[in-house]
């Protein structure tokens, strides 16, 4: 991603190949959530809990290292 830092774009200029942005992380969270849900179970509250659970799991992993 060869471009300048901007509020709606990347936060570090000229990211190396394979670099990710917060958009990438949000897309991954959303896809993981939707894949785990049955029809009719998709709610804002369930998605919020999914995000909290994922980040808590990462924190727990870091604490264990």
Image (cartoon, rainbow, N blue to C red):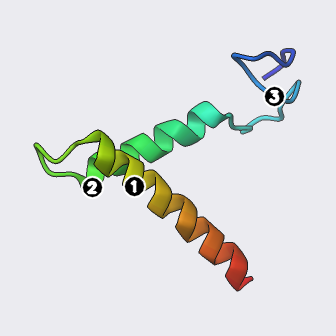
Residue depicted at 31% across the width and 40% down the height: 44
How many discs appear?
3
**Which residue corresponds to mark 2?**
36
Q: Is residue 46 above or below residue 3?
A: below
Residue 21 location, x and y as percent? 68, 34
**Which residue corresponds to mark 1?**
50
Q: Is residue 65 above or below residue 52?
A: below
Q: Secondary structure at mark 2?
A: helix
In the rendering, which numbered label is found on residue 61?
none
Q: Quadrant of residue 12?
A: top right
Residue depicted at 77% across the width and 35% down the height: 17
Task: Measure the C-alpha gap from mark 2 to mark 1.
Answer: 10 Å
Q: Secondary structure at mark 3?
A: loop
Q: Please state if 57 lies on the left or on the right of 65 as rendered.
A: left
Labels 2 and 3: the sequence-earlier one: 3
**Which residue corresponds to mark 3?**
11
Q: Please state if 57 lies on the left or on the right of 15 as rendered.
A: left
User: Crowding near pointer 2: few (<14 within 10 Å), some, many (20+)?
Assistant: few
Q: Is residue 62 above or below residue 42?
A: below
């Amino acid at each position: 991603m060869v471009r300048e830092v901007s509020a709606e774009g990347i936060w570090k200029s000229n990211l190396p190949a394979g670099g990710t942005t917060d958009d990438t992380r949000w897309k991954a969270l959303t896809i993981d959530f939707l894949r785990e849900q049955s029809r009719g179970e998709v709610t804002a509250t369930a998605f919020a809990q999914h995000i909290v659970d994922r980040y808590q799991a990462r924190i727990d992993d870091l604490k264990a290292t």
